[in-house]
Amino acid sequence: MVMKNYPSQFKADAVALYESRPEATIRSVAADLGINPETLRNWVRAAGVSRPRGRRTQEPAQAPAPLEAENAVLRKKVRELEEEREILRKAAKYFAGGDALVNRFQCVAYLQRRYGVKRLCSILGVSRSSFYYWRRTAADRAARQAADAKLAARIQAVHQESDGTYGAPRITVELREENGVAVNHKRVARIMRASGIEGVRLRRRHRTTVSDPAAVKAPDLIGRDFTADRPNTKYVGDITYLPIEGGRFCYLSTVIDLASRRLVGWAIADHMRADLVTDALAAAVRTRGSLSGSIMHTDHGARAQYTSRIFAEACRSAGVRRSMSTVGSSADNALAESFNATFKRETLRGRKSWPTEHEARLDAFRWLNRYNTRRRHSHLGQQSPIAFENAHHRTQLRWHKPHNPCSVFGVKAPGVR
């Protein structure tokens, strides 16, 4: 499912991506792009690229304030009151935060040699049996804490590998596949909260497409049904902007398969002419080999690119049936809009723009390829689009395997006419 003959521009972009990321290895960049590491290594060599390579001590417990000489009854009562006050004063540092009951147990454990468990439990309002159970299970808690610390380190690594975009659901699936052990998603979420690890969150979406009501459009063949039974039957396309510092923009045109959510074609340019969308469609044809009989659903385009004669001719040449959403309704092309929002959310990561057009193109090049090869998609059961298509292809081979194996290769078996 991966290209064997790579265009020269793809090779140049791959080398530039590797050169721009000193912390990345050949293997990690190749994995993001879905290519063989040795292939990328050869491209890098051919291009002649080289890269540079006082512990705080605890204050001693203060002794209770000296007691004045009084009669025996008053002296005992004052001593008890002073002791309770001293206990509560020392216990105050255990109640700054966290679990209040555990804080009380920790206080009892710390002060029990001086005041006794019974007296401390009475003053702090906890059950002695509960305290003893808590102390008895201390080893188990320590083991769980150690396991959580180990898991937190792996969660941090997976989070970094996803460029800081994965939240608890995707990280959970990654850990399950990596270790072969069931990891509860609630535990992952809890550890992420405790460690301050967060995935990239959805931000408010800005509308970028303003359709022309007077433009000639194709019928809506999708009807907001963004599903397909098999790949290479239904696609959606859209254009989004890439903001560059200084008020400049680049524009990204995409073609997405509705069955596998695979980005089969895309193009970036510093203009919004109709050839931007025809270039993306041509890239999709190269990826699939043929789009004949499939549906291509779009909106009108900010400048009527999808209603243009050049795009209509490109669709006819590719054997694609055009489909268009209602004028001014973003919901009719919601999947493409959602893809664009995810792309900018996970590449900009809170920034308002890219410093240069070169950096914007490299970030887009890396993310768009990684989206197909590695990024897990919730709609696909947390598989990447290419992994989903490969699994679908294997399933089809099993269900549609010919009775005569030789017929797969166009060879007649002995005795077969």
Image: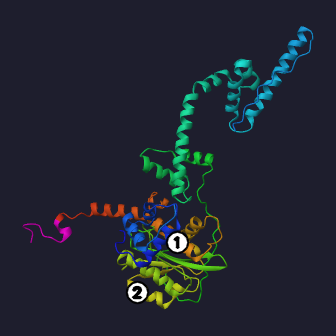
Residue 261 at x, y percent in the picture? 46, 67
Q: Return the residue nearer the eye: 18 or 323.
A: 18
Residue 19 at x, y percent in the picture? 50, 68
Q: Quadrant of the N terminus?
A: bottom left
Colouring scheme applied when the structure was drawn: rainbow
Q: Which residues are magenta?
A: 406-417
Q: Return the residue nearer the eye: 152 or 415.
A: 152
Q: Which residue is mark 2?
A: 316
Q: Looking at numbered disc 2 in the image, what kind of residue is underneath it?
A: Arg
Residue 293 lies left or right of residue 226; in this view the side is left
Q: Residue at x 51, y 55 (%)?
A: 170
Q: Residue at x 61, y 63 (%)?
A: 202
Looking at the image, residue 216 lies above or below residue 71:
below
Looking at the image, residue 181 lies above or below residue 270:
above
Q: Residue furthest top?
A: 72
Residue 234 at x, y percent in the picture? 43, 74
Q: Residue at x 67, y 78 (%)?
A: 246
Residue 352 lies left or right of residue 312; in this view the side is right
Looking at the image, residue 265 lies above or below residue 215:
above
In primary-sequence order, the first of circles 2 and 1 is: 2
Q: Quadrant of the C terminus?
A: bottom left
Q: Which residue is mark 1?
A: 362
Mark 1, Cα crowd under 10 Å, few <14 / some 14-19 / many 20+, is: some
The span from disc 2 to disc 1 (Cα, nearest Å) is 32 Å
